[in-house]
Amino acid sequence: MLKLYFGNNAAVISTLLLGANLGYILWGFLNRATIQKWGMIILLFILLHGTLWYFTNVRDLYSNSIIYATDGSVGMGLFSVSSIQSIVFWVASVIIWALGILSIFKPGYRQNIFFIIAVVSVVQIAFIEGSRIWLYNSVPARFEYM
């Protein structure tokens, strides 16, 4: 199981970023009464969250899945482009970005938008990471690249 989160450099970095994302959400919740600049908090979270998903996509060889779907010249990554994991990832990402853009125009709702983004992010993380754990326990050979 440690291989999932510490199997290679990208896994270690994505594990640290996963902890940072969850810690940032918790920090925002605990300090909600004193935070004044919710727009900046949202922006920093979207950047941190995007960095997390960049490294998790590298970790899970998602670029190979894209190439595999287009011409099949490389082996597929951990999840296919048409998998439910990919769909959940992209839908959640679009929601997060759309809410981030909306927060530019609705400053009075920024705190609420942050918490909606946080919930969507936690669901996204839980689903993808839960899928990885389930896949590792059911088909450990898929993780030989790590």
Image: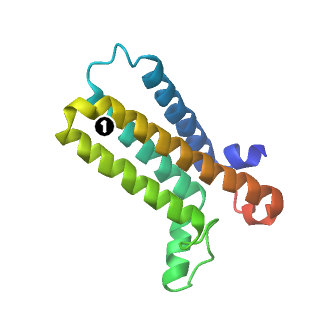
Name the residue tied to disc 1.
Answer: 43
Q: Which colour scheme is used?
A: rainbow
Looking at the picture, tell me which residue is in the foreground, 17 or 41. 41
Q: Label 1: state its secondary structure.
A: helix
Crowd rating for badge 1 (residues with CA inside 10 Å; few <14, some 14–19, many 20+): some
Vertical side of 35 occupied by 100: above or below: below
**Relative image position of residue 122 (x, y in whole percent):** 54, 41
- Does the rendering let one see residue 44? no
Vertical side of 52 occupied by 36: above or below: above
Count the labels in the image.
Answer: 1
Q: Is residue 137 left or right of residue 125?
A: right
Indicate the amino acid at tag 1. Leu
**Relative image position of residue 42 (x, y in whole percent):** 33, 35
Looking at the picture, tell me which residue is in the foreground, 52 or 37. 37
Q: In this view, does 84 lie to the left or right of 118?
A: right
> Farthest residue toward the bottom?
71
Looking at the picture, tell me which residue is in the foreground, 12 or 42. 42
Residue at x 75%, y 56% (from the top left corner): 134
Q: In which quarter of the image is residue 73?
A: bottom right
**Relative image position of residue 89 (x, y in whole percent):** 50, 57
Looking at the picture, tell me which residue is in the foreground, 114 or 51. 114
- Does the rendering let one see residue 43? yes
In the rendered view of the protein, which quadrant contains the C terminus?
bottom right
Vertical side of 106 occupied by 72: above or below: below
Residue at x 53%, y 49% (from the top left corner): 124
> Farthest residue toward the left?
105
**Relative image position of residue 82 (x, y in whole percent):** 55, 74
Residue at x 79%, y 46% (from the top left corner): 1
Vertical side of 117 occupied by 139: above or below: below
Q: Is residue 5 left or right of residue 141?
A: left
Residue at x 39%, y 19% (from the top left corner): 32
